Amino acid sequence: MRIVDLDEAHVEEYLICLEDWSDEIREAGDHKRRWYERAKNEGLRVKLALDDEGSAGGMIQYGPIERSFAQGNDLQFIYCIWVHGHKKGRGDHQGRGMGTALLKAAEDDAQRRGVPGMAAWGLSLPIWMRASWFRKHGYVKADAMGMQILLWKPFLGDAVAPRWIRRQKTPDRIPGRVTVTSFRNGWCPAQNLVHERARRVCEALGDAVVFRTIDTSDRCRLLEWGISDALFIDGKEVRTGPPPSTKKLERLVRRRIKRL
């Protein structure tokens, strides 16, 4: 295994989270590409774990917390760390230490640059981006918002703990129409997939439905709302992890149309 910085040869794989076998992830549009093109000029760093054959089996992306969906000063923020665990495509690479190696490489990079600490988000449930996994690697809880845990590891004594950006308001509905509001940041293909599915559903259902996009890659918009990625139907938030199917989203919207 080798840990390397992202290069042009692996960009396309990175943009779809190494799932080049997946037709579903290609539904997510080009939002990740546009986010990456901007973020790479704003301090984003990406590292890949390559197996003995040179195939990328894992990735980590991190950058200044001031550009993330958390708040803090001078810290690096881990957007995600992902080791491919599907049998399809490049195969299951989990359980080989790739995640640990990626995390250490990112921490070493940050410390070499004098960064005072590293932040990451995790879930309290034993699924993807587990908070418990980061705790095993020396991270402690800095803040919590439902099942989303914000963790950090200080490197220097003057490091200041990060905090979640909390919701400031909820989108209103337009009277007489079903109002679907999508908050889209762009960094996560899974959330981009939800956005694209919802958009297509709304377009197919005609004038009874209005679809609104709030682009939270604009930091001012993110802070205005306190929301990074989310989907609301008539002001009610829809669970987006894992991404709901097109059929489910259509069913939810049609249910609201019947109440008009």
Image (cartoon, grey):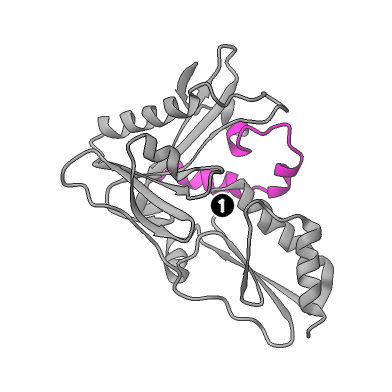
Q: Residue at x 49, y 25 (%)?
A: 98
Q: Is residue 58 magenta?
A: no
Q: Amino acid at mark 1?
A: Gly
Residue furthest top in the image: 52
Q: Nearer the viewer, residue 126 or 184?
A: 126
Residue pictured at 78% horizontal, 57% vertical: 246
Horizontal and vertical percent position of residue 73: 27, 52
In-front residue for pair 34/147: 147
| Magenta-drawn segment | 13-42
According to the picture, the residue beneath numbered tag 1 turns out to be 186
Q: Which picture quadrant has residue 240?
A: bottom right
Left or right of residue 34, residue 234 in this image = right
Q: Position of residue 258 (x, y in %)?
A: 82, 80
Q: What's the residue at 64%, 81% (across, down)?
A: 173
249 sits left or right of 16 in the view: right
Q: Is residue 44 visible?
A: no
